[in-house]
Every structure is written in structure tokens, then in C-alpha cells.
Image (cartoon, rainbow, N blue to C red):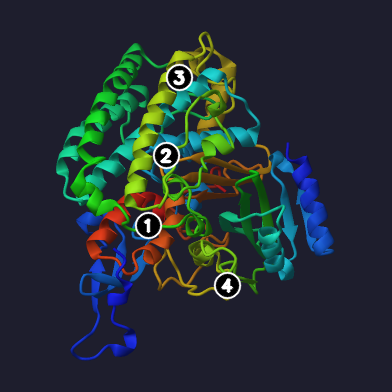
């Protein structure tokens, strides 16, 4: 698809022959988010792309400097809103690292289940939307109801569907009900059929392959130079996954493989995400099977973990802790931590500096989208506009994470 | 766990560049070094190109303001994926002269991270290909993450916040 030789050199621009400027965005249905690309086009071929970001910037890092630690979780929801639970868990684990708390194995496993469900939801949206952008609506319509089932599971755990605010520092807010477990079992049992059907529709589909193979490729070297992480880096052939490199939340207990691609093109990115969904299912099955019994669903961390209401009314200690947490007067050690989790799009890092106050002194989110989206203008140089659209959707650029 | 790496880094950096390390620590098992501003580019280049250390991946780059509000800092998180080494490099400089060399020639991916740091802290990265605001509007004339700009409007008197908030 690389047709660089067809482009008119700038010096040859004349009155008969000139570039046209096209605004792709800020709101364009094909960009799936609010960001603008100013394209300098030679007919259908992109000569230069100038991305503009920041349309939904909400100053999360500044907001976080004024909020107590437990109130920052809802902010993290809104980073990558396709997989908010991963962001929530990442934040909880960062604070746990700062205060030096270890959580029970059972919490780790419950977190793994939730994070892998979120990864499936994230990849499912991305992959089905690649289908839509290439003109295959069917796969999207069939598979999307399974995201609803995942959202139902979130809902029965925490009451919210999209911006979940799931879990607490030190564990979960309550024990999972029988309905939740039934829903999870049901999902693990039924989803493979749906995913298989989805794969049959797209994976070896001639039209889909013609559209995606060799479209918007990126080499492993360039991907590393541009600090790519996650499925986009793995599609280029680098087997880096935070879950394996620096295991958190007991990921070392699970048996799964890291799928990698070869050429880093749209098809490889699609296939890596597809395989990761199968691996996530495998991890969830193992977590359900090996779930430790007779352990609490949260760590013994009264200073961060709201006590049950009946204890607040009847027990002085619980009342004091309740007051301290609600007023944000919990003491936190001084320190500087960096914690990263494998988010839907790559290494989601939290750089937290605490000066011992009630709020973080500095909190920085390492947002994978923001970092790899800068390579987009390089990747689309010399390719057709329609290929640029599916390159963008296969990179899974989420506006919330891009702009923070 | 990372004591060996910490020792090795300490030795290697001080052997190559004497007296550039202002401080170093291994808090939370994460090797961190504070490097003098004038040598930051050379040290980063050395860390990337040294065969054994091979910090080929820039994980994160961000700004920081010290508590006395007189200094700004830039924090680099580097990563060597094959050996899974991570290191944090900090550098501090005067807030009235926030100028340091860019890292875009070492890692092209530093481009937007430096633009973000400029946008929020006003750090001027010398040699950056296109240093302009990225998330905030171009017309903005302050650097909003600096501590001198509090989150809420300080002229409001309908809210008594002395018990809460920083």
C-alpha cells in the first residue's frame, strides 16, 4: 500500500497540481473519539498528518493533587474508559505499594478475574470496530452483546457499568454475590462460542485480509523508539508484557502465553488482540479454579478501608476510622513509587510522589495511548486515507487516555 | 532485589562521569539517581548506548516541582526490557531558567512527553523539533501544574476551605 513515489514533491506544486488540506476530526465518526488530524493530501494519499490532541483534557493530574487517595479512583476510571477496572486496580496497587500493604491471595485472584474481563471488553471493542471500519458490521453486532454481559458482571459487583470505581485500596468493597459468580461462570462457558463465531467471520476473511494486511505497519525498532507498549508493540514482534516482566497481583501463578505478531500491521494488531482474548479466558478459568477459599476479600487495612456501617454505629474504633477516611485525614508515608500494570493498550504507569500529606504531592499517569499516538503521523505517511482510518482504529486510541 | 543493579549503576556512572550524581537511593526497590543538569544529556545517552546497561526504552518522562517552589525537575523512567532493569533519573534546575537539553535525539518517543512537560511546567527543552503546547490551548499564558496556580479560584469567599484541602 506504500505509494510514496506517487506524491508530488513540494517544489513541483503548481496551479494545476497542489495539495489539498483535509480536516479529519475533531468529531468524525471514523476516529471514535475527539481528536483532529490535519491531513495534507495528494488525492487519496496522505502526504503529511498533523495530529491535534487535548480536546477532552480534564486536568486529572492537577485534580489528583487536591484529592485524598481514595477519591482518586474515580479519576482513573476516566482514563481508558473501555477498561476502567484495570485502571482502578492499578491505582489501588500503587497506593498499596506506597503504604507497604500486602493483600490476601484471594483479592489478587479476584482482581485478576476483573482485570482480564476488562481486557476482553477492551479488545472486543477495538477488534469489532476494526471490522466496522472495514465495512463488516455483522461481527460487531454479534459480539457486542458480550460486552454487555461483562458490564453486567461489573454492575453486580460495584453497581456501575462504564466508570466503575471498582474495588478499594486493600481489596474489594464487598464479597461477590452468588449472582456474580453465576454470571462469571456463564460468561466463561458461553463466550468462547461467540468469539469463535467472530473469528470465523473475520480472521480468514478474504476482503478483511486484503484491507488489513500490510496496512499501517510499524517495525519493532521504530515501535520501541516511540515507546510503544501493549498489543501494538507485541504485534511488531516484541514479547513485552508487564504481566510477565514484572508480575503484579499474583500473575506469576497463571499459565498463559504472550501472542506476538510479525510485521506490526493492522492485521497483526487485530490478531494479537484476538489471541489475547483467548488467553484472558484461560487466565479467568485458572483463577476461578484455584481461587483460595476461606480468605477475606480485603486486607486488614482499617485506615484506608471503610468499615461496615453497623460497626460504625456500635464500635468506637470503627467510627474513628470512618471519620478519618471520609475526611481524608489518613496518614500516608513519604515516598516515591512507580507502579505499572498491563492496561488494555499497554503499560499503564502511575508515578506517585507523597510528602506525607492527605493528598499526593505529584501524580503522573503514564498513559500508553498518549505515548504511542505520536507515531501515527509517521505511520500514515504515504498511505491512503481509508487505510489511515483503520490504522487508527487498530491502534485503539482512546480519547480519555490520550488527553487525561 | 535490585541492589546489584543499583551498585552497578552507581559505579558505571561515576566512573564515566565523576561528580555528576547529586543523590541516589533505592527506595521501594527502584534505583533512582539525581544527576546534575549540565550532564543530563550525556548521562542519558550513556545509559542508552552502554552495552551492559542498554536502557533502550524510555518508559516515562514528566515534570516535577520541588516543595520550596524554587526548582523544577524532570523525571525520566528508563527500562531495559531483556534484562528487566528499570531506573529513575531526576534532574533539577532553577525555576527562573528552566532549560535542559532535549531527549528526542536519543528516543524519538520523548517528543510528546516533552511537549506535555513544557505545557504543564514550562520546561524548555533545547533542540526539541516542535516545542509547543499539546493538551492545553495555545493561547494559555501560564503553566498550570506549577504549585503557584492552585486548583480553585482563590478569590472566592463563599467557600471556607481552611479545614480541607491543601
Separation of residues labelled 4 and 3 (CA atoms): 50 Å
Which residue carries the number 4 mark? Answer: B124
Which residue carries the number 1 mark? Answer: A217
Instruction: Determine the secondary structure under disc 2.
Output: helix
Q: Are marks 3 and 1 in contact (CB under 8 Å)?
A: no
**Residue A373, picture quadrant:** bottom left
Counting from the top left corner in percent of width and height, residue B161 is at 51, 47
Give B46 or A215, whichever is nearer the viewer: A215
Q: Earlier in the sequence, mark 3 or mark 2?
A: 2
Identify which residue is drawn at 57% across, 48% down: B166
Of tags 4 and 3, the one toward the viewer is 3
| Labels 1 and 4 share a subunit | no
Q: Is residue B73 above or below residue A115?
A: below
**Residue A50, picture quadrant:** bottom left
Q: Chain of mark 3?
A: A
Instruction: Determine the secondary structure under disc 4.
Output: strand
Of tags 2 and 1, the one toward the viewer is 1
Amino acid at each position: 500500500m506504500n505509494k510514496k513515489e506517487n506524491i508530488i514533491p513540494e517544489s513541483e506544486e503548481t496551479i494545476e497540481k497542489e495539495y489539498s488540506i483535509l480536516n479529519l476530526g475533531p468529531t468524525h465518526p471514523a476516529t471514535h473519539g475527539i481528536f483532529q488530524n490535519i491531513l495534507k493530501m495528494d488525492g487519496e494519499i496522505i502526504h503529511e498528518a498533523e495530529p491535534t490532541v487535548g480536546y477532552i483534557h480534564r486536568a486529572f493530574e492537577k485534580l489528583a493533587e487536591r484529592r485524598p487517595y481514595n477519591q482518586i479512583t474515580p479519576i482513573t476510571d476516566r482514563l481508558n474508559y473501555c477498561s476502567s477496572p484495570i485502571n482502578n486496580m492499578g491505582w489501588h496497587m500503587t497506593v498499596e505499594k506506597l503504604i507497604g500493604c500486602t493483600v490476601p491471595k484471594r483479592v489478587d485472584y479476584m482482581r485478576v478475574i476483573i482485570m482480564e474481563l476488562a481486557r476482553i471488553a477492551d479488545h472486543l471493542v477495538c477488534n469489532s470496530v476494526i471490522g466496522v471500519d472495514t465495512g463488516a458490521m455483522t461481527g460487531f453486532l454479534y459480539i457486542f452483546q458480550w460486552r454487555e454481559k461483562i458490564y453486567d458482571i461489573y454492575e453486580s459487583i460495584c453497581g456501575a457499568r462504564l466508570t466503575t470505581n471498582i474495588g478499594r485500596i486493600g481489596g474489594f468493597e464487598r464479597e461477590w454475590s452468588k449472582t456474580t459468580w453465576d454470571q462469571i461462570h456463564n460468561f466463561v462457558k458461553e463466550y468462547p462460542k461467540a468469539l469463535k463465531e467472530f473469528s470465523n467471520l473475520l480472521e480468514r476473511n478474504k476482503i478483511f485480509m486484503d484491507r488489513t494486511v500490510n496496512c499501517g505497519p510499524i517495525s519493532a525498532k521504530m515501535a520501541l523508539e516511540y515507546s510503544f507498549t501493549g498489543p501494538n508493540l507485541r504485534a511488531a514482534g516484541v514479547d513485552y508484557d508487564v504481566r510477565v516482566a514484572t508480575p503484579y497481583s499474583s500473575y506469576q501463578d497463571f499459565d498463559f502465553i504472550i501472542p506476538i505478531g510479525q510485521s506490526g500491521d493492522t492485521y497483526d494488531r487485530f490478531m494479537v488482540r484476538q489471541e489475547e482474548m483467548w488467553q484472558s479466558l484461560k487466565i479467568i478459568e485458572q483463577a476461578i479454579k484455584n481461587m483460595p477459599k476461606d480468605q477475606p476479600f480485603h486486607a486488614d487495612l482499617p485506615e484506608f478501608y471503610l468499615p461496615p456501617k453497623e460497626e460504625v454505629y456500635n464500635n468506637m474504633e470503627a467510627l474513628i476510622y470512618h471519620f478519618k477516611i471520609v475526611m481524608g485525614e489518613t496518614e500516608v508515608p513519604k515516598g516515591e513509587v512507580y507502579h505499572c500494570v498491563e492496561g488494555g493498550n499497554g503499560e499503564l504507569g502511575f508515578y506517585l510522589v507523597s510528602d506525607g500529606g492527605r493528598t499526593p504531592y505529584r501524580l503522573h499517569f503514564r498513559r500508553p495511548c498518549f505515548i504511542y499516538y505520536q507515531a501515527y503521523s509517521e505511520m500514515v505517511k504515504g498511505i491512503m486515507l481509508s487505510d489511515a482510518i483503520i490504522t487508527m482504529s487498530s491502534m485503539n486510541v482512546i480519547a480519555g487516555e490520550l488527553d487525561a | 532485589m535490585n541492589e546489584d543493579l543499583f551498585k552497578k549503576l552507581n559505579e558505571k556512572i561515576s566512573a564515566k562521569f565523576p561528580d555528576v550524581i547529586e543523590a541516589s537511593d533505592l527506595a521501594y526497590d527502584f534505583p533512582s539517581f539525581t544527576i546534575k543538569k549540565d550532564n543530563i544529556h550525556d548521562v542519558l545517552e550513556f545509559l542508552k548506548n552502554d552495552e551492559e546497561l542498554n536502557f533502550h526504552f524510555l518508559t516515562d518522562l514528566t515534570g516535577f516541582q520541588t516543595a520550596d517552589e524554587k526548582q523544577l525537575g524532570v523525571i525520566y523512567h528508563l527500562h531495559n526490557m531483556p534484562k528487566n532493569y528499570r531506573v529513575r533519573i531526576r534532574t533539577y534546575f532553577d525555576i527562573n531558567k528552566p532549560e535542559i537539553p532535549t531527549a528526542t535525539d536519543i528516543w524519538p518517543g520523548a517528543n510528546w512527553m516533552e511537549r506535555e512537560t513544557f505545557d504543564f511546567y514550562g520546561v524548555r527543552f533545547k533542540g526539541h523539533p516542535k516545542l509547543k503546547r499539546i493538551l492545553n490551548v495555545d493561547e494559555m499564558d501560564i503553566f498550570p501544574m506549577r504549585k503557584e496556580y492552585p486548583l480553585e479560584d482563590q478569590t472566592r469567599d463563599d467557600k471556607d476551605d481552611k479545614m480541607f484541602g491543601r
